């Protein structure tokens, strides 16, 4: 089961890295009006997720640093923050296509860049990768909880087993 957990963590790392790049590009293109709060929150959630992965990835392979409660707590926090960032971006973008020029007047798209359609596509891609990262964080948390439960059940089973000594 650790193989599945490590695969979901690597996917989480990939989605977080891609989303960080997209969010950074949108922030860098902002040339007037200040940075939108939803982008600021998204970069915060992604940075928190990336920093937590510095503990979560090595904890897969080094038993001495693995604390199941910390692992599950970080996964839950990652899920909550990324999920909220995905909702905030989706609400700001309104679910409209990038071909509609009237759609470009929202807070994220009208503040920067010389190509609003490209900026719109980057914002939509960022939203999708925020959702992917939130999903992989949730799956990682579920798998980590299952692994912790299985480990505790195994410990209980070994501690309840009576000491059978053979007497002749």
Image (cartoon, rainbow, N blue to C red):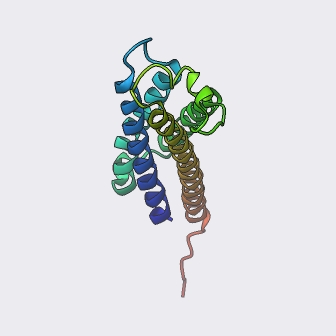
Q: Is residue 159 above or below residue 112?
A: below
Query: Where residue 45 sits in the image (x, y, percent)?
Result: 48, 31
Q: Residue at x 40, y 48 (%)?
A: 13
Q: In this rendered view, identify the residue nearer to me: 28 or 43.
A: 28
Q: In this rendered view, identify the residue nearer to me: 68 or 54.
A: 54
State how many labels appear: 0
Q: Quadrant of the C terminus?
A: bottom right
Q: In this rendered view, identify the residue nearer to me: 120 or 68.
A: 120
Q: Is residue 157 above or below residue 11?
A: below
Q: In this rendered view, identify the residue nearer to me: 61 or 19.
A: 19
Among the 4 quarters of the image, the one containing residue 155: bottom right
Q: Is residue 18 above or below residue 32?
A: below
Q: Residue at x 60, y 68 (%)?
A: 162
Q: Residue at x 43, y 58 (%)?
A: 6
Query: Where residue 110 sits in the image (x, y, percent)?
Result: 50, 21
Residue farthest top in this picture: 33
Query: Where residue 95 sits in the image (x, y, percent)?
Result: 66, 36
Among the 4 quarters of the image, the one containing residue 55: top left
Among the 4 quarters of the image, the one containing residue 33: top left
């Amino acid at each position: 089961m650790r193989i599945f957990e490590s695969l979901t963590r690597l996917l989480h790392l990939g989605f977080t890295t891609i989303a960080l790049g997209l969010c950074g590009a949108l922030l860098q293109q902002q040339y007037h009006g200040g940075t939108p709060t939803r982008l600021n929150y998204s970069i915060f959630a992604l940075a928190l997720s990336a920093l937590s992965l510095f503990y979560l990835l090595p904890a897969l392979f080094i038993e001495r640093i693995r604390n199941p409660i910390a692992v599950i707590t970080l996964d839950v926090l990652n899920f909550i923050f990324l999920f909220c960032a995905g909702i905030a971006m989706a609400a700001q973008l309104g679910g409209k296509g990038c071909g509609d020029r009237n759609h470009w007047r929202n807070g994220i798209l009208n503040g920067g860049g010389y190509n609003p359609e490209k900026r719109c596509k980057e914002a939509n891609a960022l939203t999708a990768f925020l959702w992917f990262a939130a999903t992989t964080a949730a799956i990682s948390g579920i798998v980590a909880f299952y692994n912790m439960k299985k480990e505790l059940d195994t410990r209980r089973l070994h501690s309840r087993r009576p000491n059978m000594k053979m007497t002749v």
